[in-house]
Amino acid sequence: MAMSDAPAEPPDRCEIAVVGGGIAGLSTALFLARAGRDVVLLDKGSPWGDSSGANAGTLSLQVKRTEMFEMGSTSIGLWAAFGTEMGIDVGFHQPGGLRVAESDEQIAFLREYGAEQEAVGFEFEWLEGNQLHDLAPWLGPEVRAATFCAADGYASPLIAGPSLIAGARKAGVRVISNAEVTGARTAKGGYRLSIGRRSLECEYLAIAAGGHSTKIAASLGVRLPLWVDCNMLTVTEPAPRIMDKVVTHIGGIMSLKQHVNGTVLIGGGWQGRGKFSRQTREIDPLAWVQNVGLGARIAPDLKTLRVNRAWAGYEAVTIDALPLLGRLPGLENAYVAAGARGGFHMGPGQGLVLSQLILEGETGLDISRFDPARFPQ
Ligand SMILES: Cc1cc2nc3c(=O)[nH]c(=O)nc-3n(C[C@H](O)[C@H](O)[C@H](O)COP(=O)(O)OP(=O)(O)OC[C@H]3O[C@@H](n4cnc5c(N)ncnc54)[C@H](O)[C@@H]3O)c2cc1C
């Protein structure tokens, strides 16, 4: 989904430049502007036109690695707060989530994983047999056990994009479309960004440009090792309620949810085909059939629905599945937020961290594991 925008040119200077209008960049810009700072957000196309506008919207704490729990629960709190405290409707719902298992092997893994999570204070409920099927009678008979996490939910990328852009503008962020940052260099008192034939000087720089962050950081002499997955997603026609929880799978290969408008989103990271350098992306038909087939096994009522649309989109990730979040190695006042697995979920938390680093020079969240300097330069 892409947002249309009133044409605007980037200014010559600003206090804080945020590069990238996805969930990470918009959250960063919003929080900074709400703190009264002068913020320009630049996007190479339309804000929300890349991963954040193409994703499944799952906010599942229980699928996250334990290192991500603090950031994950902070982010869920912020997803809720957008609507309740900031007047920004992001289509947030928190029906709770089931992480399901089918085989003996998967059940053993679910137990093992649950024990690790319990050890760090994570709360969930173990369900199997009748107890599980009483709670979720719409699950297929092959689903034998699940953990239930009440914190799990989802937000609607369709609703959240326009709302967050409008909310950021209202807070004072100058949101500029069609402003591709082609390079950056240090300048007196900060940074000079090249935007086509124009340039913008800023004191602080926040890079949140998804998989493209690598290129911008490289122009500053910083190596950010990111690669991209090409995830597929399917949306059905609207239907009467057939499920009332978010579903994920212990195999890491499924996400299902039914939105309030009745459409069901079927995801789970099944890979499409694409070349990031050429920005091509398409469905892989064989993998797609397996993705949808698994969905229909988990929730058999899906078989009665027609598919409205399926697509593929890019997700930037790191080799250790932890984000690149914090100060750019060797530079002052330049930061990055990119590469979080489940980056839609994590985006508001990442925005909070970058805004706190810029406002206060520190953050209350433990981001030591996410330091971009953990990778060799
Ligand atoms: C099909 C699919 C399903 C997914 N499902 C989920 C899910 O259910 N839950 C979840 O948590 N995550 C999910 N993800 C991952 C999630 O979408 C991403 O991790 C997240 O949206 C990344 O947000 P971001 O702000 O970091 O990057 P993006 O949303 O990619 O935003 C980056 C922005 O930077 C801009 N930009 C890039 N280069 C430049 C430049 N040089 N100058 C100016 N602007 C630039 C782009 O135009 C873009 O708007 C999914 C991804 C896909 C593709």
Image: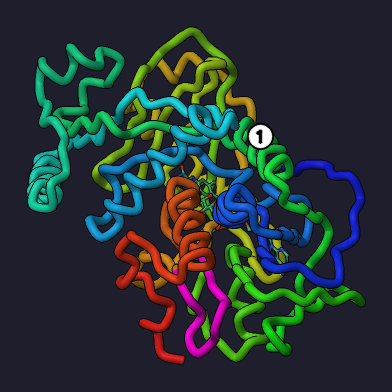
State the scheme by which the image is colored. Answer: rainbow
Instruction: Reply above or below: 253 against 274.
Output: above
Secondary structure of the residue carrying tag 1 is helix
In front: 268, or 3? 3
Can residue 177 be seen here? The reply is yes
Q: Position of residue 332 (x, y in %)?
A: 54, 83
Q: Position of residue 168 (x, y in %)?
A: 67, 45
Q: Name the residue under label 1.
A: 163
* Quadrant showing the N terminus: top right
Q: Which residue lies furthest to the top in this view?
A: 240
In front: 132, or 28? 28
- Whether residue 174 is in magenta: the answer is no
Q: Which residue is drawn at 44% across and 20% down?
A: 302
Q: Where is residue 267 in the image (x, y as percent from the top left)?
A: 46, 39
Q: Which residue is drawn at 47% across and 66% down?
A: 360
Q: Residue at x 36, y 46 (%)?
A: 74
Which amino acid type is shown beneath numbered disc 1?
A: Ser
Left or right of 118 on screen, residue 220: right
Name which quarter of the figure residue 18 lies in.
bottom right
Q: Residue furthest front?
A: 36
Q: Position of residue 213 (x, y in %)?
A: 60, 71
- Start-end of magenta stretch: 326-337
Name which quarter of the figure residue 374 lies in.
bottom left
- Whether residue 335 is in magenta: the answer is yes
Left or right of 47 on screen, residue 360: left
Crowding around mark 1 (Cα neighbors within 10 Å: few <14, some 14 to 19, many 20+) is some
In front: 288, or 229? 229
Q: Residue at x 12, y 47 (%)?
A: 121
Ligand 1's image quarter is bottom right
